Amino acid sequence: MRPLLLLDFDGPLNPHRADGIPPGYERHEITEGAKTWRLLLNQQHGVQLNALANTFDLVWASSWEHGANRLLGPLLGLPELPTITWPDRRPVRKGSWKTPYIAEWVGDRPFVWVDDEADETEFTGDHQLVYPVDARIGLTATDFAAIQSWADDKSFVDKGSRTDT
Ligand SMILES: [Mg+2]
């Protein structure tokens, strides 16, 4: 079974708490309707994520929901990805508000969840990895290598495309 890579956007791919513009990033301003957002994007992220897609099935797990495919993915050269949505955000007693939705969405599939607001202890199964990212820094080359080596250590077989559903 191919593992999932669940991607938060703000924080890991848009280090919105950075001081200024960190090396490798560019400021982008995107507009839709009356809304405008200012983002920091790193083109290397697109390259690295497309490389991880040889091992993982990439999934948006961002409060941008479908806006991630519409507005953000194309800026990084990412294809359209499955998207977790968060209807009627449920209150949680502890941890991230995303946790119950993620638990439901992933079922028994192995996954890495990359997020700046998740706590490592939210999922502790052998085939589950919560990967916290600092929103001042965003994902780094070291992080991408660590995510790949997690999958390598678990010996997930690359089937190229999923045929088991
Ligand atoms: Mg975030």
Image: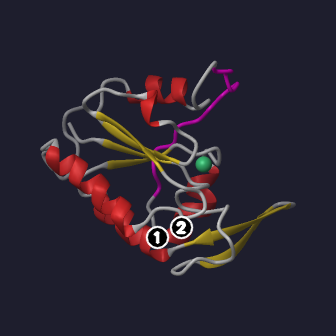
From which residue to which does the magenta span run? 80-92
Q: Position of residue 6 (x, y in %)?
A: 43, 44
Position of 135 with respect to 156 (left or right) is: right
Position of 136 with respect to 31 (left or right) is: left
Does the magenta-highlighted stretch encompass residue 87? yes
The quarter in which the N terminus is drawn is top left
**Label 2: which residue?**
74
Q: Is mark 2 within 8 Å of ligand 1?
A: no
The quarter in which the C terminus is drawn is top left
Q: Position of residue 126 (x, y in %)?
A: 25, 30
Which SS class for mark 2? helix
Mark 1 and mark 2: Cα distance apart in space: 5 Å
Q: Write down the quadrant of residue 127 in the picture.
A: top left
Picture residue at 29% right of the left edge, 65% below the top: 51
Does the magenta-highlighted stretch encompass residue 106? no
Q: Which mark is residue 77?
A: 1
